[in-house]
Structures are given as structure tokens and as C-alpha cells.
Amino acid sequence: QVQLVESGGGLVQAGGSLRLSCAASGRTFSRNTMGWFRQAPGKERQFVAGISWSGGSTNYADSVKGRFTISRDNAKNTVYLQMNSLKPEDTGVYYCAADSDSWTIYSYTYKYDYWGQGTQVTVSS
């Protein structure tokens, strides 16, 4: 079992930055592929970024490449999402997720077993 709690969301102006954190509990955190997803009002949940268990591999949605950085600290059971140059279209609820079965970083929501409750990010123009 893995429990996930996100934090760090808020209201920011376009061009600004936010850093999201996802604190995990559970002994198997360091063996999980982790992902960040977001969901805008009326839209499906979409993949934003993912990171392998070691942190050696990362993957990003095209829309955030060059602006967002995912990282993890297994000693602290935490995964981060640094978001720079934010745009209004980045607005949404951001969810942290854990995939306990795969070594590959998938962008599909169904591949992830555990989810946090989400944190709201609002980017004003």
C-alpha cells in the first residue's frame, strides 16, 4: 500500500513558478514509478510527467517539456514537480500517482495503482 499526499498548489500569475510536492507513505515507495497528472474542469485527466524508481529516467508531456521538472528523493519518500513559466492552460487539479507494477514510465492513468487527493493550481493571465 502507498498513500500519497500532494501539496504546493496555489494561485500564480502567468510566467510564475510553483513547486508541487507529493509525500508518500509505505515501504515500497522507492520501487514505484511515479507520475504527475492534471485535470482541467470538464476535461480528462492527463499525464504531465513521470519518473522511474531510481530517478534516472523521466518523461514529460509535450506541453510541459522545457518548463516542468520532475524529481524524487527516495530517502524522504517524496516526489516533486517544479513548474516554471506557467501558462493559464496549466490550470487544473494536479495529482500524484504511483505505479507499483511497471519499470516503464506510462502516460496512461489506468497503469497507476495509487493516487493522491490532488492539489489545485490556478494560473491567471
Image (cartoon, helix red, strand yellow):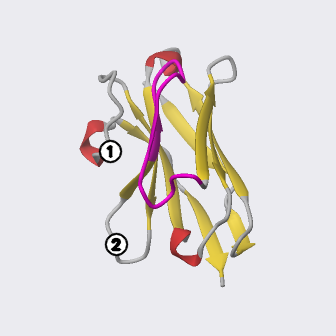
Residue 26 coordinates in the image, percent (x, y): 52, 21
Q: Nearer the viewer, mark 2 or mark 1?
A: 1
> Residue 105, relative to residue 38: is it above or below?
above
> Residue 83, relative to residue 58: is it above or below?
below
Residue 45 coordinates in the image, percent (x, y): 36, 60
- Residue under the point 27% across and 37% down: 111
Dot 1 surroundings within 10 Å: few (below 14), some, or many (20 or more)? some
**Viewer-side residue, 124 vs 87:** 87
| 25 displayed left or right of 39 | right
Residue 55 coordinates in the image, percent (x, y): 54, 24
Q: Which residue is mark 1?
A: 107
Report the amino acid beneath label 1: Ser
Q: Which residue is mark 2?
A: 43
Does residue 23 appear anywhere in the picture?
no
In terms of secondary structure, what is the magenta stretch mainly?
loop
- Measure the C-alpha gap from mark 2 to mark 1: 16 Å
Q: Determine whether label 2 and label 1 are within 8 Å by CB.
A: no
Q: Which residues are magenta?
A: 49-66
Does residue 39 appear anywhere in the picture?
yes
The answer to which quarter of the image holds residue 23 is top right
Label 2 sits on a secondary structure element that is loop
**Viewer-side residue, 24 vs 57:** 57
Label 1 sits on a secondary structure element that is loop
Magenta stretch: includes residue 62: yes
Q: Quadrant of the N terminus?
A: top left
